[in-house]
Every structure is written in C-alpha cells, then in structure tokens.
Image: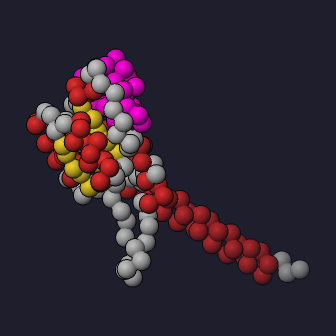
Amino acid sequence: MFAKQAYTILASSDNPSIVRPKILIVTAHPSIGAALQTVLRLEDRYDVRRVLRLADGVALAESWPADVGLIDGVLLTGVSAAIGIPALVLSGTREQGESLVTHLDDGRGWLPKDVAPDELVKAIDGVVGIIRVEGDVMGTVGLLSAVIVAVAAVGIVLLVIYRLVFPV
C-alpha cells in the first residue's frame, strides 16, 4: 500500500517529493501517546496524528488513511476493530500483544509500550516496506568502489608495460 505511493513525483512541481508515511496513534494514555508522538516527529520522518478512543481512530482512518496504526492494547480488550489500516498493538507483555493482534482486521504484530525509539522506527518501517541505509554502509560501498578502480588502474598500467617490453 505505502510502497506504491512513497516515492511519487508530484505533478505540480518540478522537483520530486517524497511522501512521509502517515502514522495514527490510538491511545488513551497521555504519557504513552505524547512519548510516541515525540519520538516519531523527532527526525520529521513521519506524519503523525493521535486520538484517544478506538472509535475516533476508526473514523480518522477513513478520512485520513494512515499507513500504519499504533493501537494501545488496553483499548482492544474484549473488542475487535476493523480500522482498515495495517496496525501494531502496544502491549505490556508478549502474551497479551500476540493475543490482541488477532482483534484487529490487519494486525501486523505487537510492540512493548516502552519500546526503544530505534525499535519503534524499525517496526513501522517494516510494516510500510522502507529499508533505511545507514551511513556506514555508504562509506563501505565507496571504499570498495575505490579499491576496485585502483586495482583496475594498476592492471591496465601493468598490461601497457608488458606490451611495451614484450611487443607482439
């Protein structure tokens, strides 16, 4: 779903634009909601909205189609929800999280409520299909490219010297 729209070029612009994934946070807990919202907005990678009730989340998902929902497991206790978007459940324990994922129409997994920021980003990116390349990987690719070019250059020089010393 998101992968098809992530790198669309806007027709009204000469410059290509990248669409940020939309994240819908559904939790009645003010501290958890604020913490998640702050973490996801830090590097401006995501467009984030938050609601307090499950019914509000369903309504917002219809008018603002998020790419991923983060749903507080407390709101899913004894209830099934058809939100219409891929969602991750926030839960205190693995058993509860795995159980509550089945209450969603498109549950993709669970996360602890105190999830580390890098794990949160990794889980969301996994749902939307984003692969992030770390800075060190680019340095390694550059170094490898430089070594290959240097070896090729040395090989060409040795071939030219060989042909000059031993003409055919």
Residue 64 location, x and y as percent? 29, 54
State the scheme by which the image is colored.
secondary structure
Residue beneath the point at 45% across and 48% down: 129
From what the image shows, is residue 25 above or below residue 21? above
Q: Is residue 17 left or right of residue 31?
A: right
Question: In the rendered image, which quarter contains the C terminus?
Answer: bottom right
Q: Residue 136 or 105: which is nearer the viewer? A: 105
The part of the image, by quadrant, that contains residue 117 is top left
Q: How many marks?
A: 0
Residue 96 location, x and y as percent? 31, 19
Decide if residue 88 is in sight here.
yes
View extreme (right): residue? 168
Q: Residue 162 or 83: which is nearer the viewer? A: 83
Q: Which residues are magenta?
A: 88-112
Decide if residue 91 is in sight here.
no
Question: Would residue 94 be counted in the magenta stretch?
Answer: yes
View extreme (top): residue? 95
Residue 124 location, x and y as percent? 35, 43
The part of the image, by quadrant, that contains residue 108 is top left
Q: Is residue 114 left or right of residue 11?
A: left
The part of the image, by quadrant, that contains residue 72 is top left
Question: Would residue 45 be counted in the magenta stretch?
Answer: no
